[in-house]
């Protein structure tokens, strides 16, 4: 067995990515419900401060307890990437912890999402600039580093995620937006944001709720 490394083509520009920073995951999910990632994959970053994950996917497919593809991905991650570790929902062995997570953070990786488990959460969970999402936490580490794939299409939390997919996360959850939708639906997302702002203003002004919501 060996790790397969694919070359990922560029997808969204930095401007196209940053344009989504003002959009909450809840608004994006309202527009693109099929792109919502399983809400059981939760933020593991501590604290009450706002949490924001935004970047394009560098995908990793692993077969726990083997985490070989995660190690290979360290040499391919670029600033702004979100490391997407598809572990098939298996939670017996953590696929990443403090050492690899810290290295990714130093390289400018935007954060990690794991359909599986992480460990060393006392460290990983205290980096507000490096959001961590996972299905579970366990102290048990990986065993073996011989298999997997980097930058392939992966099944992750009920979604298909390809390299370059826009990954957004906040304390509500996660969404994976294909590049074509990220370009086509941005204006719709901004319109929904403006609509919700009008709802808030209407309620604060004393307008009856039935009128505010057009009932």
Image: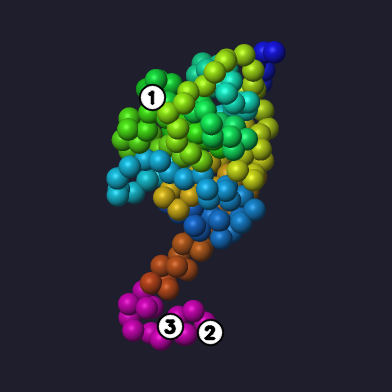
**Residue 23, numbered circle:** none
SS at mark 3?
helix
Mark pair 1, 3: CA separation: 49 Å
Point out the tag, 2 or 1, that comes first from the N-terminus.
1
Do tag 2 and tag 1 residues touch (Cβ < 8 Å)? Answer: no
Residue 215 got which mark? 2
Whether 16 is drawn above or below 7: the answer is: below
- For mark 1, does the 10 Å Cα neighbourhood hold few (<14), some (14 to 19), or many (20 or more) residues? some
Residue 19 in the image, given as x and y percentages of width and height: 48, 46
Alpha-carbon distance for marks 2 and 1? 51 Å
Of 99 and 109, nearer the camera is 99
Q: Is residue 159 left or right of residue 19?
A: right
Q: Residues within 10 Å of mark 2 (few under 14, many from 20)?
A: few
Q: Nearer the viewer, residue 138 or 189?
A: 138
**Circle 3: is it few (<14), some (14-19), or many (20+) Cα within 10 Å?**
few
Of the numbered discs 1 and 3, the one sitting upstream in the chain is 1
Residue 98 marker: 1
Find residue 57 and report its image quarter. Answer: top right
Q: Which residue is mark 3?
A: 209
Q: In the rendered image of this protein, does residue 135 appear above or below residue 123? A: below
Q: Residue at x 59, y 26 (%)?
A: 64
Question: Which span is picked out in magenta?
Answer: 201-214
Q: Could you tell me which secondary element the residue under label 1 belongs to?
A: helix
Q: Quadrant of residue 200?
A: bottom left
In the displayed structure, 133 sits above or below 202; it is: above
Discs 3, 2 touching: Cβ within 8 Å: yes
């Amino acid at each position: 067995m060996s790790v397969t490394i694919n070359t990922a083509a560029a997808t969204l520009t930095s401007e196209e990515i940053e344009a989504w920073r003002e959009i909450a995951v809840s608004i994006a999910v309202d527009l693109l419900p099929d792109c919502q990632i399983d809400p059981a994959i939760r933020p593991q970053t501590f604290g009450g401060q706002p949490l924001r994950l935004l970047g394009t996917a560098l995908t990793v497919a692993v077969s726990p307890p083997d985490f070989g593809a995660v190690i290979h991905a360290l040499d391919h991650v670029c600033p702004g990437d979100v490391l997407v570790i598809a572990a098939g929902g298996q939670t017996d062995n953590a696929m990443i912890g403090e050492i690899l997570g810290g290295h990714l953070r130093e390289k400018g990786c935007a954060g990690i999402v794991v359909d599986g488990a992480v460990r060393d959460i006392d460290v990983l969970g205290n980096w507000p600039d490096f959001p961590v999402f996972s299905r579970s936490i366990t102290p048990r580490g990986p065993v073996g580093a011989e298999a997997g794939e980097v930058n392939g299409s992966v099944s992750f939390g009920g979604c298909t995620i390809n390299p370059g997919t826009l990954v957004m996360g906040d304390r509500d959850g996660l969404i994976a937006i294909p590049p074509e939708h990220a370009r086509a639906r941005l204006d719709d997302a901004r319109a929904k944001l403006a609509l919700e702002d009008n709802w808030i203003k209407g309620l604060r002004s004393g307008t009856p709720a039935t009128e505010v919501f057009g009932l």
